[in-house]
Image (cartoon, rainbow, N blue to C red):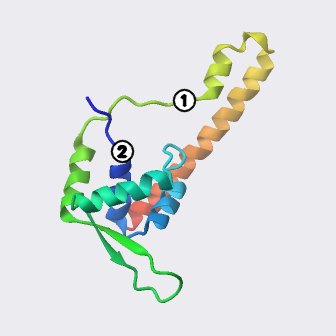
Amino acid sequence: MAKENTTIYIILGLLNHEDLSGYDIKKRADYMISNFWELGYGQIYPTLARLEKDGLVTKRISEESKGPERNLYSITGAGREALTEWLKLPEQKEYTKYEILLKLFFGSLVPLEDSAKRIDAFTRCLSQIWNGFWVRNRIIFSSI
């Protein structure tokens, strides 16, 4: 089975909330999902072109009077259907890489206290990520 281009669905998901430029998509992704998914400009703009060609988004020139012209993208009905169908699919195999887990696995060469400190720091970090995730989701879902 071919690997799914998740960038398509990230962009459709963000556009489902509001019309955005490519720059705005990157900023929203950095704020909302960067703790668990990386999205770069090199992925965003080619994907937007493909989505427009496939009729899943439309593009228009921003009517803001300040600054240079910007392209704003909107999700279409077909884009919303594609996003909905993807949301119904089971997840593909999840990949998560943590350097800390490798260091703990091979950690017999360092004092046990060093590993314990790493675990404490990692636990605090994950707790902050989890709390931030829930705060952002409450903000997102309270506006729906």
Q: Can you give x and y, in whole percent of width and height, for residue 13 in the image?
A: 34, 56
Q: Is residue 56 visible?
A: no
Q: Rate crowding at label 1 as few (under 14), some (14 to 19) or many (20 or more) other CA atoms within 10 Å.
A: few
Task: Find the distance from the CA under tag 2 to the CA under tag 1.
Answer: 18 Å
43 displayed left or right of 85: right
Q: Amino acid at mark 1?
A: Lys
- For the residues bearing labels 2 and 1, Cβ distance under 8 angstroms: no
The secondary element bearing badge 1 is classed as loop
Q: Is residue 108 left or right of residue 13?
A: right
* Placement of 29 over or under 120, stated as above or below: below
Q: Nearer the viewer, residue 23 or 132?
A: 23
Q: Secondary structure at mark 2?
A: helix
Instruction: Check the image and report above or below for 25 versus 10.
Output: below
Give percent across and percent down for residue 20.
41, 69
Does 48 appear above or below 21?
A: above
Residue 99 rendering spot, x and y as whole percentages: 63, 27
Residue 14 sits in which quadrant? Answer: bottom left
Residue type at mark 2 is Thr
* Label at residue 97: 1
Tag of residue 6: 2
Q: Which of the two labelled residues, at mark 2 and mark 1, occupies the earlier sequence position?
A: 2
82 above or below 21? above
Asked whether the viewer can see residue 17, the reply is yes
